[in-house]
Amino acid sequence: MVMPPILSPVPLLSRSARRSIVVGVALSVAALMFAVSVTGQPPASGPASGEAEHFKYASIGIEENEGLPYWIWQALPRMFPEKLPGPGGYSSFGIIWEQGKEMPVGFTKKRVSGVDRVAINCAFCHTAIVRTARDAAPMIVPGGPSNQLDPQAYVRFLQAAATDPRFNAGEVMTAIDQLTDLSWLDRLQYRFLYIPGVRKALEKQKRDLAWMDAQPRWGRGRIDPFNRVKFSYLRQPVDATIGNSDMVPIWNMRPRMGMRLHWDGLAGPLREVVLSSALGDGATPKSIDLKSLERMENWLLDVKPPKYPYPVDGALAAVGEQVFTAECARCHAFGGARTGTVIPIAEIGTDRHRLDMWTKGAADAYNAYGEKYPWDFDAFAKTDGYVAMPLDGVWLRAPYLHNGSVPSLYDLLASPDKRPTLFFRGYEVYDPDRVGFVSSGPDAERVGFKFEASVAGNASAGHTYGVDLPDDRKRALVEFLKTR
């Protein structure tokens, strides 16, 4: 929610033809290895209950305006398996699918105007998954960064499917008939309204997102969260800026109140971030579910990051706490003098593409966007650097820096010239030796996205704090960071 998804699609038909019939491209999330394939039929589940369940599955008001008809969504991976990145249906994009749930984490299913529609909510970008060993059960962490998500590949799959000659009423209906028995009315609506409408919408979306084709790929665990907002919603000129950013955790937000939010601090109050994120997901000022969002926001205030799942050397961590206090606390401890503030790019020295993507014109346009509604935006801004973030749950935030260009904490404490220039993102097995996810070897290569620091927007330079510490002090510091 702190990082709004931006690939919201367009209406199926003109409002004059069928105002309520619209389609959304629902961006899916995380966990390639242990997702249940959408090509199966998991048992249906009841409505979300409990705050974590609400966060994972509840509607935020997107379905009415941009919900993808359920049976089309189900049929696509069956019809076009060759367009998927691998076996397993939608799971090949990294969907988290819990046992006994009808929908994946971060997806909603809601009946609107007589048809079930699939949409997304905040959890699809903000639910982490981790395994402590190759054969260990996955741990799902609502509020964590979706480190296995490949949203761009998912969107491109839907576009490729919709522009295939086989995406026509006859063949799509044949695929749907293999899944369910629709009523005669539903069959008419699917054949004459939904199927041609989805095709038309996704064809238009492909044209609208053509600017992405000239940009570096996001890869797993990353997204360009603001260029689509900037171009489509805020009507700023289309440019060649690169906004690729690592997914962020959104847990423990209460002690962050008053801090600047997003990687570059472009936003202020949490309420504005929550509302703008829902709009970025595809809600409209009319359809946005304010009560559901308020419930999620209240939960995020106090939900805590998970504890480090491996043994910690207490004595070494105690030494590391002293190192942290001396070297890091000013910027990365709650209450630190610079924590939650923007550190100028001239000082921090990290890749500046994400910073340059956001403009003063975009900030001004966003602040003006909500003026005619009961809610309003006032705190969007253009900054000159990146925010010094508190390090709670830092062990689960790998890869590091705003663009996810450094795979482990040990790599982050190395001088920039010694950091890996090529590794693989998106494999959920953890590496306690390096303190980050496994990012090399056959499994990481098979599952992950090949990340190259030489690509524009991917530079791993900068943030040289601590690189000159003696090795024993670095080991102690990392041991302490495991406890954060």
Image (tube, rainbow, N blue to C red):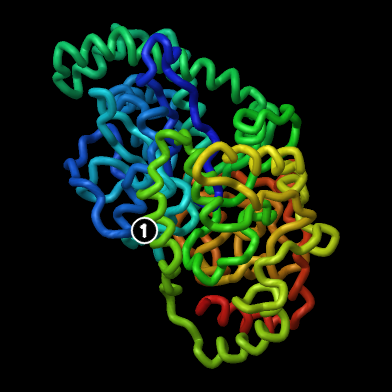
Q: Secondary structure at mark 1?
A: strand
On screen, residue 270 versus residue 268, left or right, reads left
**Residue 199 visible, this angle:** no
Residue 346 screen position, x and y as percent: 85, 59
Residue 88 screen position, x and y as percent: 34, 36
Residue marked by disc 1: 140
Instruction: Tell me which residue sits at (71%, 50%) in the image.
Output: 381
Residue 231 screen position, x and y as percent: 66, 30
Residue 259 higher or lower than 458, as above or below = below
Between residue 123 and residue 286, name the one nearer to us. 286
For the residue marked with disc 1, what is the amino acid? Ile
**Residue 132 visible, this angle:** yes
Residue 366 higher or lower than 469, as above or below = above
Between residue 447 and residue 379, name the one nearer to us. 379
Between residue 149 and residue 69, name the one nearer to us. 69
On screen, residue 56 versus residue 322, left or right, reads left
